[in-house]
Image (cartoon, coloured by chain):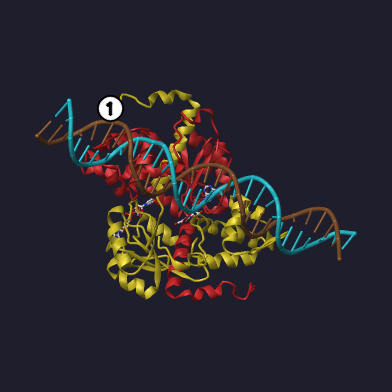
Chain colours: A red, B yellow, C brown, D cyan
Amino acid sequence: MIRRLSQARERGIPEATVARLPLYLRALNGMSERGLATVSSEDLAVAAGVNSAKLRKDLSHLGSYGTRGVGYDVEYLIYQISRELGLTQDWAIAIIGVGNLGRALANYGGFVSRGFRVAALLDADPAVVGDRIAGLNVEHIDELEAVIRRRGVSIVVLATPAAAAQQVADRVIAAGITSILNFAPVVLSVPEGVDIRKVDLSIELQILAFHEQRKTDRMTGGAAMAEEWPEAVDL
Amino acid sequence: MIRRLSQARERGIPEATVARLPLYLRALNGMSERGLATVSSEDLAVAAGVNSAKLRKDLSHLGSYGTRGVGYDVEYLIYQISRELGLTQDWAIAIIGVGNLGRALANYGGFVSRGFRVAALLDADPAVVGDRIAGLNVEHIDELEAVIRRRGVSIVVLATPAAAAQQVADRVIAAGITSILNFAPVVLSVPEGVDIRKVDLSIELQILAFHEQRKTDRMTGGAAMAEEWPEAVDL
DNA sequence: GCCACTTTGTGCATCGGTTCACAAAGGTAC
DNA sequence: GTACCTTTGTGAACCGATGCACAAAGTGGC
Ligand SMILES: NC(=O)c1ccc[n+]([C@@H]2O[C@H](COP(=O)([O-])OP(=O)(O)OC[C@H]3O[C@@H](n4cnc5c(N)ncnc54)[C@H](O)[C@@H]3O)[C@@H](O)[C@H]2O)c1
Ligand SMILES: NC(=O)c1ccc[n+]([C@@H]2O[C@H](COP(=O)([O-])OP(=O)(O)OC[C@H]3O[C@@H](n4cnc5c(N)ncnc54)[C@H](O)[C@@H]3O)[C@@H](O)[C@H]2O)c1
């Protein structure tokens, strides 16, 4: 959490807002390509799939970049959001674990576009090390520290099996990395100051299944209710 | 949102709780494998990376399944959470778009384990249709409706390019699907009653970049503050 | 059968986030 | 310059989620 002295002046952008800025940015880029010069909060909100009051409040955290009666200048807003998110600089990322998923990520052109550059691929398997993927040589995990330093890596994408993830994360953090995107289905435990975000496919599916079950339960009547306490202890 | 009459009695599990149940389930499965018979809220909370009061409140939404002074029976709790999430039944999923990412997903064994089964692969590209991946034939998207019906698909994973996603989603929904996991970087617009969850790599990276920038700004002193209003209009 | 100990389940205060609704600000027309 | 129109920026009410703290409920020892 890290409470700070100048918290007030230190533009404290709410986490929920930060998570939506990339959405606005994407919508704005689409508009920019279509040649729109300005956009109202209402239109931008629709494009981003949020409510317009929320959008305005979000943008107000960055500053007063709109013009009343007119809206927001598309290019200027793109610039301001990009700057706020730190996309005006170039981020070197390393992908660790070049299996099924790691390969797909390495070959994916989608994030290269905006500020991110895959700068290194690392794996532990000698059969994989040395492969050339998406123009990069897969390097051995033993080289981790050197590779991070040499390539200026500041964000690591973890795509190793779950069993290896914590151990690799520890090492990555020891090498000075403080931002990790984790695809392995484990709860990583990390020291304060290190940011972890996780992408967990199986959790997403389970959430969908929960709601899907609700929907079908509802159709087949409230019969499911009788099941709430079946035979108490079956298992 | 769908407000309902019996909302009170209809066990209304908070969305935030639903999103954590899979986490608890995963931790519990690990404990089960290690032969633990019971677990306290404190231990389970640590394993799942949450605070124990939150864990207890979450579980209390499912019922009173613990024993004071003892804790929770591991197997019984696994059963109750699984049932709540709808994992006691088998879910057939279809992956649409068998490119880089679709292939990685199809080959991934991780979710097959718990209730989910990849039952169909679909693509529009004639060069891909007919390929055999992970024991399945890739079928043509024209067969969508028939495949969904024939295989009993109830959850669709969208891994097509962004440009095709909305159109494919519309068709999938018209075919009766109400649960979609979307990997394409677009805001899908869907009718009420359809659940969309999205996985967006590029958004995750941008959020990490934001925090990373904050961290390094902080190190290099408050100099960044002077930049808040640079030359007003540069772009 | 009673006491000491453990751990659950939850009432309550608090917090962050969302939404409403409107005054303030700017643009445009004449 | 004034009057009218549009749209922002934000105060305030509201809502869901979090976490504290403790009474209630159960176990085990003797
Ligand atoms: N493939 C998917 O669609 C998918 C989906 C969701 C989650 N995941 C998760 O992503 C991770 C990777 O999945 P995958 O299908 O690519 O697995 P994979 O087995 O194909 O690839 C894992 C790679 O990591 C490498 N590796 C193992 N230990 C390592 C170490 N200590 N250091 C560096 N590299 C190491 C292996 O050599 C292998 O190349 C897993 O944790 C999986 O659960 C995958
Ligand atoms: N690869 C990644 O790591 C990655 C990461 C994040 C997001 N994404 C997103 O996931 C999606 C897929 O990425 P990818 O790298 O696999 O792309 P890809 O181009 O390799 O694969 C897309 C597949 O979809 C098929 N397709 C196109 N139109 C279709 C239609 N109308 N119906 C059915 N199939 C159709 C194509 O034939 C192709 O096989 C993209 O939207 C991408 O932005 C990918």
In the image, residue A44 sits, relative to residue A151, either above or below, namely: below
Q: Position of residue A58 (x, y in %)?
A: 38, 40
For disc 1, the chain is B
Q: Amino acid at mark 1?
A: Asp
Could you tell me which residue is drawn at 48 percent across and 59 percent down? Answer: A202
* Horizontal relation, residue B15 to residue A56: left or right: right
Q: Position of residue A133 (x, y in %)?
A: 39, 47
Which quadrant: the N terminus of chain A? top right
Res B15 visible: yes
Which residue bears the numbered disc 1? B234
- Residues B134 and A195: in front is A195
Could you tell me which residue is drawn at 42 percent across and 73 percent down? Answer: A219
Q: Position of residue A135 (x, y in %)?
A: 37, 43
- Under circle 1, the secondary element is loop
Q: Position of residue B31 (x, y in %)?
A: 64, 59
In the image, residue B72 sits, relative to residue A105, either above or below, namely: below
Which quadrant: the C terminus of chain A? bottom right
